[in-house]
Amino acid sequence: MPSVLDFNNVTFGYSREPVLENVNLSISSRDFIAVIGPNGGGKTTLLKLALGLLEPNLGTVTLLGNSPYQSRTLVGYTPQYLQVDPSFPLSVMDVVLMGRLRKKSGWWYSREDRAAAQETLHTMQLFEYRNAPFGSLSGGQKQRTLIARALCGNPEILFLDEPTNNIDPSSESILYKILERLNERLTILIVSHDVGVVSSIVKNVICVNRTVAVHPASQLTGLLLHDIYGSEQLFVRHDHRCTVSETPVQEIPQERPR
Amino acid sequence: MNHLKEIFFAPEFAFLRQAFLVSAAASFPFGIIGTFVVVRRIGYLASAISHCAFGGIGLGIFFQQLAAAAGFSTLAFFLNPFPAAVVFSILSAVLIGVVRYSAKEREDAVIGSIWASGMAVGILFLDKTPGYHSVEAYLFGEILLTSNTGLLIVGVLSLGILLVTGLFFKRFEAICFDEEYVTLRGLPAKFYFQFLLVLVALIVVLMIQLVGVILVIALLTLPASIAGRLTFRLFPMAVLATGLCFVLSWTGLILSSRFDTAASPTIILVSAAAYVLVLLTQFLYARIR
C-alpha cells in the first residue's frame, strides 16, 4: 500500500518547549488509524501539522505526495462539532454543501454540487434531515453532518477530531459502523480519547505524548497505555476484530489512581 | 395612512420624503451585512469601526477649516469630513483584522484601545478646530437633513452591497460558520473576513449621516437579530432583516413626525422595542406550549 501521510523528523513547539519532538510516521493508503494520548500530549498539534494549519519547526510533512498546503483540497476534515456555533442559521443541506467549496467554484452551488451533497447525506443516513436546522440535530447527527460535509468534496483521506465527544452510545455505534464502511475506499485518521472503542474498530494506533509510536490496534494493552498516559488506565475493550489477539478482553489495574 | 400621504406629497415635507427614501435604500446594506455581523458575532468590531470613523470626521473638519482660513476655498470644499472618515474606518477595519489574526495581545483589549483612540483623535482635532462645531450630528445623525447627494450615495452603496454579497454569499456564509474549514478547502478565508470588515466599515461610515456613530450599530444588529429569531437559514434571514429594517425605520420616522421627536433615536427605540417584543412573544409561546 502506498504511503499517504509522512512525518520525517518533525519537531514543533508553540514556544521554545517542543510539543512534538523528532516525529517519524508513515500512514498507508486505506489505513484506519487512531491518534490517542493524554491531554496536551500533542494529538491536535499532530493533526494540524498533517492538515498544514501549522508549519513544523524542523522536518517535513508530506500529504498525498505533496506538501499539506498543496493537498488540502484532497483532504476531508471534521472538527469537533462543539467548535462550530450550533445556533448558526443553516440547514443540514447548507452545511454539507460547504464541502463543495473550491477556489475555482462558481458564485453559487451548481446542480452537480447539490447532487453530490444529497448522495453524501444518503451515505451518512441523514437525507431525511436535509432541510432541518443544523442546530436542532442531536450531537451524533451534527457530527455526521460535519462528516458528510467533509465527504462531499470527494476526499482521499479523512481526518476526524474527537468525533464521539458528547454523543450518546447509540449515535456512536452508528457513526463507527459508517466509518468502517467508508474505510473500504478512504484512509481515515481519527483523534480520540475513547481508547477502548476506537481500538476495536481501527487497524493501527498512533500513541502521542511528545514523541510518537505506532502500534497495531490488536497490540494495545493496559500496560502500553500506562506508558503513554503515565498513570493507571481502566481499559475496557469492546472487542470485535481483536478477539484473535492475546490482549485480554478487560484489563483493570491492580490499584486505582488516587 | 393619511399622515403618510401628506408627508409624501406635501412640498413642505420634502425633507421627510427624503428621509423615507434614504432609510428605504439603507435597509439593504443594513439588513444584508447586518446579518453577517450578527451570525459571526462581530457587533463589537463594527462598534469599534464606527467609533474610529469619528476620528476621521474630526480630522476632516480640522483640515477643512484650516484650508478655508488660509483662503483655499476650493480645497476646503473638497476636504469634506466624510472621505477622511472613510479612510479612517477602512484603516481601522484592516487593523482590527490584523490584530485578530496575528497579535499576541488580548484581542478585546487591543480592539478596545483602537475604539477609544479613534474617538480621542476625533475629539482632539475638533477641539483644535477654530469656531464652534456641533458633534451631535455625527454622534446621533441627522436623517432629516439628507441631501440629494446623500440619497444618491446610499442608493449606489445599496446596489454595490447587493452585487457584492450576491457574488460572495456562499463564501461569506462559510467563513462565518467555520473559517478553519474554508482555509482547508484552499480558499483565502482571512481575506474574505477582512473584506467583510471593510464592507462593514463602508456601511458604517456612509450611514453615520443617517443615524450617527453611536446609533449606527443598532440598525446594523437589531433587525438582523430579530430576523435570526424568526428564520433558521442565512439567506431568508438576510431578506427578512432587510424588510424589517425598512419597516422599522419607516415606523420610527412616522412616529417621530407625529410626536415631534428626534428621528434617529425614535427609529432605534422602535427597533429595540420590536426586538424585545419578539423575545417576549417567543418566551411566552414556549411557556404556553
Image (cartoon, rainbow, N blue to C red):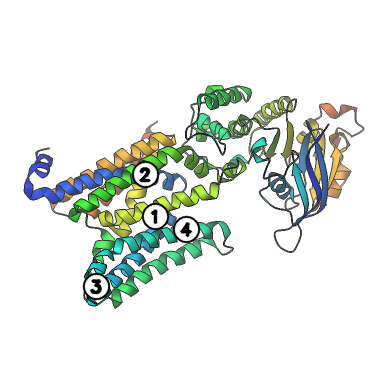
Label 4 or label 1, whichever comes before in sequence order: 4
Q: Mark 4 and mark 3: span between their CA atoms?
A: 33 Å
Mark 2 near mark 3, Cβ–Cβ under 8 Å?
no
Q: Which of marks 3 and 1 is in front?
A: 3
- Number of numbered discs: 4
Cα separation between marks 4 and 2: 19 Å
**Element at label 4:** helix
Calculate the distance from the C-alpha at mark 3 to the C-alpha at mark 1. Answer: 30 Å
Looking at the picture, tell me which residue is in the foreground, B1 or B128: B128
Q: Which mark is residue B201?
A: 1
Which residue matches tag 3? B72
Q: Residue furthest right?
A: A246
Pick whichever of labels 3 and 1 is earlier in the sequence: 3
**Image coords of residue A230 (percent x, y):** 83, 52
Tell which subunit mark 3 falls on: B
* Residue type, mark 4 in image: Val
Name above or below for residue A117 compared with residue A224: above
Q: Judge whether A12 appears above or below B120 on screen.
A: above
The span from disc 1 to disc 2 (Cα, nearest Å) is 12 Å
Amino acid of disc 2: Ile
Amino acid found under the numbered disc labelled 1:
Ala
Q: Do labels 1 and 2 share a chain?
A: yes
What chain is tagged by disc 2?
B
The residue at which mark 4 appears reads as: B94
Q: Is residue A120 left or right of residue B232?
A: right
Q: What's the amino acid at mark 3? A: Phe
